[in-house]
Image: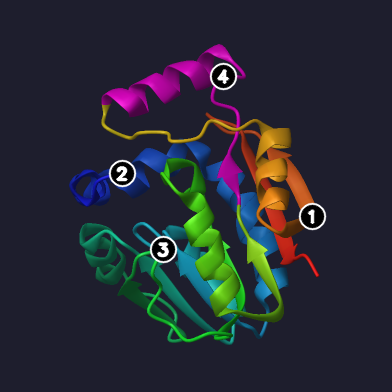
Amino acid sequence: MKKKIWDLYAPIYELAMRSDEKTYKLMYSRIPKVIKDKEVLEIATGPGLLARHVAPAAKKMIATDYSDGMIREAKKKSCPDNLTFEVADAKALPYEDNSFDVVLIANALHVMPEPEKALKEIDRVLRPKGILIAPTFVGHGASLGSRLWSKILVIAGVKFEHQWNAEEYQAFLSENGWRVVNAKLMSARISMLYTECVREA
């Protein structure tokens, strides 16, 4: 999806996500336990909402987005000293091999035309035995509410390249060499599948 769409919506993105605050609180509770004292990369941070909540648990965290507008919004608010925001493309990350213990990418793979390329880059920058945390929307057609919200987003210019259900999303991860070690389906306007993965041996 074009950068200009995300740049356009950057100032209101955090407000638009407030309806799913309960779902995000579940991730705010879980993710710090996984990233404790680890070096973390977040991809598709948006305005940095998730990053600011979980970064205090990490040793160091870099939160990235390919939208300059999103990163500008993220930098406007105070954040933990161990958190920095940078512009970066998920499919061409500017980091060396084996740089991070955990990579977090929330609700982004489904809007990428070639999410496989992002997963390859994630594999490259993760250290051996590293963890991928990749929650993604999976319930686009599960209810009337989710169908309506999906249509509203499409009208607004948010294109869904993939509309996986929970089983299809886990199969996609497996096909690309990732083993899901923890999964939880979370209720939201569009249901979200929280996943923690490790690289297949």
The residue carrying mark 1 is 182
Give the foreground label among 1 and 3. Answer: 3
The residue beneath circle 4 is 141
Task: Answer above or below: position of 183 versus 41.
Answer: above
Give the CA separation, mark 1 to mark 4: 24 Å
Assign a secondary structure to mark 4.
Answer: loop
Task: Name the residue rendered at 49%, 60% in the picture.
Answer: 118
Outermost residue, top side: 144
Foreground: disc 2 or disc 1 = 2
Per the image, label 3 sits on a secondary structure element best described as loop
Crowdedness near tag 2: few (<14), some (14–19) or many (≥20) residues, C-alpha within 10 Å: few
Seen in the picture, residue 139 relative to 194 is either above or below; the reply is: above
The residue to which callout 2 is attached is 1
Q: Is residue 8 left or right of residue 118?
A: left
Which label number is shown at residue 91? 3
Q: Secondary structure at mark 2?
A: loop
Q: What is the image's colouring?
A: rainbow
Tell me what residue is drawn at x 55 percent, y 65 percent.
120
* Residue in the image at 66% along x and 75% along y: 35
Of mark 1 and mark 3, the one earlier in the sequence is 3
Tag 2 near tag 4, CB within 8 Å: no
| Residue type indicated by callout 4 | Gly
Magenta range is: 135-155
Which amino acid lies under the numbered mark 3 shown in the image of this protein? Answer: Lys
